[in-house]
Amino acid sequence: MEIFGLHQYIKDVTRRLGKLGAFAVAPDYYFRKGDLVKVSEIAQLMPLVNAKPDAELIADLDATVAWAKSQGGDTSRLGIIGYCRGGRTVWVY
């Protein structure tokens, strides 16, 4: 994901990866802050995004991996993609 929420581009990339055979998941790890797709002003968006503690982020991603495994995903071949702030998330995770 990225700071602008789980928007159509992220969903499209996830669908395309799935069509190529990946078990692809796009978690909305800012869901506790609201639907960021609906926030149009960067000045309103940044405080929401910056309020997400890394520990919560890691816990959400761990839960996503656990869910994927429970659904038959091969988590021994895990990959993660991030755009914008999601790139930072890749490094942290």
Image (tube, rainbow, N blue to C red):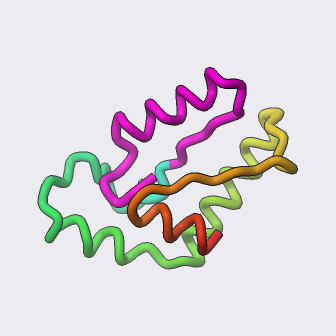
Choose top left, top right, bottom left or bottom right for residue 17: top right
Residue 83 is situated, as x and y percent measured from the top left of the image, at 44, 56
Which of 81 and 66 lies nearest the eye of the viewer?
81
Residue 46 placement, left or right of 71: left
Give the residue at x 14% y 70%: 43
Q: Is residue 66 magenta?
A: no
Give the residue at x 51% y 56%: 82
Give the residue at x 39% y 61%: 84
Which of 91 and 26 lies nearest the eye of the viewer?
91
Q: Is residue 56 shown above or below 18?
A: below
Choose top left, top right, bottom left or bottom right for residue 26: top right
- State which region is magenta: 1-27
Q: Is residue 10 shown above or below 17?
A: below
Residue 8 is situated, as x and y percent measured from the top left of the image, at 35, 34
Residue 13 is situated, as x and y percent measured from the top left of the image, at 49, 35
Looking at the image, the residue that sits furthest to the top is 19
Residue 76 placement, left or right of 13: right
Choose top left, top right, bottom left or bottom right for residue 31: bottom left
Q: Is residue 15 magenta?
A: yes
Q: Is residue 25 shown above or below 56?
A: above
Quadrant of the image for the C terminus? bottom right
Which of 34 and 3 lies nearest the eye of the viewer?
3
Q: Is residue 93 shown above or below 19?
A: below
State the count of labels: 0
Looking at the image, the residue that sits furthest to the front is 20
